[in-house]
């Protein structure tokens, strides 16, 4: 299977998704949008992963590559390709599918509980997930739920944490893919100012077991989203 992924910042990679793809033997290609790589003109891949990034989906002047990126995402979904969006990626998918993306009431950075809503608990994708789990967050914006989708998950600081469009397009606001090593790199990029929903780096990195638990949930989801052919 040919899996293509979109990278928005040099320090934000696939996390635990990378080893999962390697174990499957998939062909993996990427577009480094931050470095000026042009996205493919057409979805000549089998599945698309759209990762996170520090920019916002509406900053077209600062990041003009957002425009062709959005065209690619829409073309891939229209062509029936499975698509997974994480954080910024989930916002980009929501945007191209007709849902607004705006500032959230709170910036969420750190470990905060996410709860499955009844619609989420009813989906086979999340069949054996706990009703509430601690997830790693790093976002300031939020998506509205795209037309035809349902709000699957919520946290105290952000009402919209996940959606699906059909059974092959998934958007997650939080970062199950991030490893402890990834988090150390991210935290070196920005000086955090702790608040109600922004935790101190020492606390974030002191919860190492949570990264492994998040990664296991990510792998469960990936196995169901993109089963081996």
Image (cartoon, helix red, strand yellow):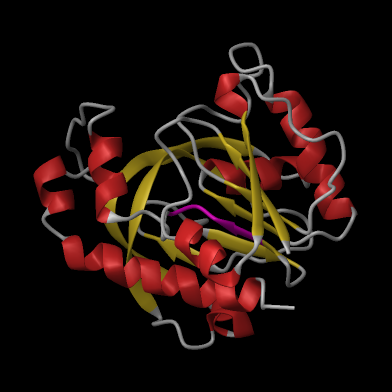
Residue 197 inside the magenta-drawn segment: no
Which of the image's four quarters has the C terminus? bottom right
Query: Considering only vertical position in the picture, is 64 above or below 159?
Result: above
Q: Position of residue 165 (x, y in %)?
A: 74, 63
Q: Is residue 97 left or right of residue 51?
A: right
Q: Position of residue 226 (x, y in %)?
A: 67, 71
Q: Is residue 178 left or right of residue 198?
A: right
What is the chief secondary structure element of the magenta stretch?
Answer: strand
Does residue 108 appear in this view?
yes
Query: Considering only vertical position in the picture, is 164 above or below 93?
Result: below
Which of the image's four quarters has the N terminus? bottom right
The residue positioned 72% from the left and 63% from the top of the image is 149
Taking depth in this image into account, of 85 and 121 the one nearest to the observer is: 85
Taking depth in this image into account, of 54 and 26 the one nearest to the observer is: 26
The residue positioned 53% from the left and 63% from the top of the image is 22
- Residue 56: image quadrant is top right
Which residue extends farthest top? Answer: 61
Tally of numbered tags: 0
Q: Is residue 41 left or right of residue 119?
A: right
The residue positioned 26% from the left and 49% from the top of the image is 181
Query: Considering only vertical position in the picture, is 120 above or below 96?
Result: below
Q: Position of residue 12 (x, y in %)?
A: 43, 39
- Residue 58: image quadrant is top right
The residue stretch that appears in magenta: 170-174
The residue positioned 11% from the left and 55% from the top of the image is 206
Q: Is residue 178 left or right of residue 164?
A: left
Q: Position of residue 11 (x, y in %)?
A: 39, 34
Taking depth in this image into account, of 82 and 61 the one nearest to the observer is: 82
- Residue 163: image quadrant is bottom right
Does residue 200 appear in this view?
no
Query: Considering only vertical position in the picture, is 35 above or below 15?
Result: above
């Amino acid at each position: 299977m040919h899996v293509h992924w979109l990278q928005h910042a040099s320090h934000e990679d696939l996390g635990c998704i990378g080893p999962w793809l390697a174990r499957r033997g998939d062909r993996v290609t990427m577009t480094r949008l931050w470095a000026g790589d042009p996205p493919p003109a057409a979805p000549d891949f089998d599945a698309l992963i759209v990762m996170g990034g520090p920019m916002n989906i509406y900053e077209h002047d600062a990041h003009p590559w957002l425009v062709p990126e959005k065209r690619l995402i829409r073309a891939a979904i229209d062509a029936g390709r499975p698509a997974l969006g994480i954080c910024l990626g989930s916002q980009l998918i929501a945007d191209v599918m007709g849902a607004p993306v705006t500032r959230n009431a709170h910036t969420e950075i750190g470990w905060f509980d996410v709860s499955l809503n009844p619609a989420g608990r009813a989906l086979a994708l999340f069949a054996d997930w706990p009703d509430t789990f601690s997830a790693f967050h790093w976002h300031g914006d939020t998506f509205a739920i795209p037309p035809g989708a349902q709000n699957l998950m919520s946290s105290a600081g952000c009402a919209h944490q996940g959606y699906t469009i059909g059974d092959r397009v998934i958007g997650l606001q939080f970062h199950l893919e991030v490893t402890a090593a990834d988090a150390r790199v991210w935290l070196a990029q920005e000086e955090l100012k702790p608040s109600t929903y922004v935790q101190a780096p020492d606390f974030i990195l002191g919860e190492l077991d949570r990264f492994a638990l998040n990664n296991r949930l990510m792998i469960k989801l990936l196995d169901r989203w993109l089963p081996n052919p």
